[in-house]
Image: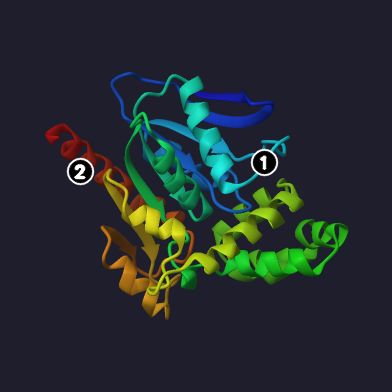
Amino acid sequence: MLVEKWLQIDGDSLYCLSTQKVESQETLVLIHGLGESHQCFADAIDWLPNYNLIMFDMCGYGYSPASCSSHSTETQAKRILKALDQMGIDRCYLLGHSWGGDISTLVCQFDTNRIVEGFINAEGGLHEESIILSQIIAEQYSGLTKAEFSEWVKGEGFAKRFTLKWHHGAGVKYLSSLRRCDPLVLGETASEIYAQHDTQDSRGVVSWGQIFENLSIPTTYFWGTQSLEGCERALNFIQTLNNVSFKGANHWVQNDPSLFYAEVEKFIVSASKKNQEL
């Protein structure tokens, strides 16, 4: 049974879709990327039946209306922690895809109560070479009026530039979610992500990547070989991390759910054993 609710947090409504909680099962929280919604993780319900699953739509995305205060990545992260507290979650694992990996990185940083016991960062923006989609969106946002940008997002502009050219199922899901997001929130978020370029160190690792590599909990980085083809500096950095590559996969490494969620489960089992040894 799936449970659908809108959590009220500091005057904002946060959409949450979860499975019925079973006390004996591990809990996995899934955080979507830029322009996406919980739909990008819909297959998890079929492939991870023995886990408590919690999926959110960030404010301004999917079924969550725009925030009355802030859409910054930091605020979105703190909102997740408040949501988990409201739901009575005292321990869980995190899986964040793309910008969701960035949000989840900050969730772990702000998690003073040590709720998160392990974190899978799937194609998050650790390195300046991997921040591409947000750059193009940010450039459109800064170069157009608000009305023109909204039309570019909701009309044919974005679809022709990206999703309809990608020729894969993730593009269809992405376009479906994108049609529901608040275009101005999308533009603001993309601009914030692109601004991470200014925080890179001599390796090209941006500030969120620097935070990720220094987290004390079990972590891993999932990446697609097609997605990072030619990004040699980014790949050099990723090889210094605990990581899992998906051969031939694009940015949406969850496109092959049987393989992807098997690796998710493998990580959780391993992290759980490590935590028990501490």
Q: Is residue 267 above or below residue 158?
A: above
Q: Give above or below for 270 relative to 79.
A: below
Residue in view at x 65 percent, y 48 percent:
177
- The answer to which of 221 and 42 lies nearer the viewer is 221
Check the image and report above or below for 201 versus 69.
below
Name the residue located 66 percent from the left edge and 29 percent from the top edge: 13
Q: Which residue position is annotated with label 2?
A: 270
Drawn side of residue 186 relative to residue 116, left or right: right
In this view, 147 is above or below 114: below
Which of pointers 1 and 2 indicates the residue nearer the eye? Answer: 1
Residue type marked 2: Ser
Sequence-wise first label, 1 or 2: 1
Residue under label 1: 70
Name the amino acid, label 1: Ser
Question: In the visual, does 221 lie left or right of 194?
Answer: left
Residue in the foreground of this view, choosing between 113 and 145: 113
Where residue 36 appears, x then y in whole percent? 60, 50
- Callout 1: SS: loop
- In this view, the residue in front, 184 or 51, is 184
Percent position (x, y) of residue 42?
51, 42
